[in-house]
Amino acid sequence: MNSTPGCACGWNRRGHVERRLQGLLTAARPEDLATAAERLTAERLDTLERRLEGRQGTAADRAGLRIARLRGLLLWRMRTDYDRRLTRAHEDLAALNGDIERLQRQYGSFVRSRQAATQSYQGYDATMRRQTAADPDSGGAGRDPDGAPGAHVGSHGRE
C-alpha cells in the first residue's frame, strides 16, 4: 500500500480494515460483521440481562428465556449470513482501493499541472517590464495613467 502525505490517517484505517478482513478468513467472527441494528440489539439485550441480574421469580425467568431466545436468533442470523457479508466487505474494500488509486492518479496529475503552470510563469513579470521599457515605439503603451505596467498591454497606442 502506498502512502500519500496528508492522508496517512485514511490509509492506516483502510489498512487496518484490510488486515481485519484477512483475519476473518482464518478465524470467523460473525459479530465483527454485524450491522448497526444488530449491534444495537445486542447492546439492548446486554442491558436487559444486567437489569435481570439478582432477580428471581417466574417473570424474571421468563424474561431471561426470551432474552436468550432473541440473542440466539440474532447470533443465528449473523452466522448464517457471515459468508455473504464477508464477500461483500471484500468487494467494497476492493472498490474503495480502486477509487483511492484513481483519485491518487488524478491528484498527481493536478500537482504536476500546477507545478508546470507555476514554473511557466516564473520571471514573466520581469520580462514584461523589460520589454515595455526597451520598446521605443510603445510610447508608454503598456502603462496605465499612473505609470504602472500592464493596464494597456497590446494596444500599442492605437485606439
Image (cartoon, grey):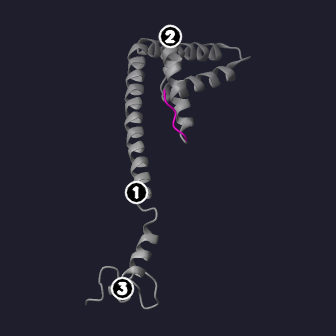
- Cα gap from disc 3 to disc 2, whole angstroms: 84 Å
Magenta: main secondary structure equals: loop
46 left or right of 88 in image: right
Residue that mark 1 sits on: 117
Of residues 1 and 84, the one drawn nearer to the viewer in this rendering: 1
Q: Image point 38% across, 18% down: which residue?
A: 87
The residue segment tinted magenta is 1-5
- The picture quadrant where one finds residue 124 is bottom left
* Disc with the residue nearer the chain's start (2 vs 1): 2
Residue that mark 3 sits on: 136
- Cα gap from disc 1 to disc 3, whole angstroms: 31 Å
Q: Position of residue 27 (x, y in %)?
A: 52, 8
Q: Could you tell me if residue 14 is visible in this image?
A: yes
Q: Amino acid at mark 3?
A: Pro
Can you say whether 122 is above or below 143 in the image? above
Q: Position of residue 38 (x, y in %)?
A: 50, 24
* Disc with the residue nearer the chain's start (3 vs 2): 2
Crowdedness near tag 1: few (<14), some (14–19) or many (≥20) residues, C-alpha within 10 Å: few
Tell me the quadrant of the picture where the C terminus can be found: bottom left
69 left or right of 61 in image: left
69 left or right of 82 in image: right
- Tell me the element at label 3: helix
Q: Which mark is residue 28?
A: 2
Q: Image point 57% across, 12% down: which residue?
A: 65
- Tell me the element at label 2: loop
Q: Amino acid at mark 1?
A: Ala
Of residues 1 and 96, the one drawn nearer to the viewer in this rendering: 1
Crowdedness near tag 3: few (<14), some (14–19) or many (≥20) residues, C-alpha within 10 Å: few
Q: Could you tell me if residue 75 is visible in this image?
A: no
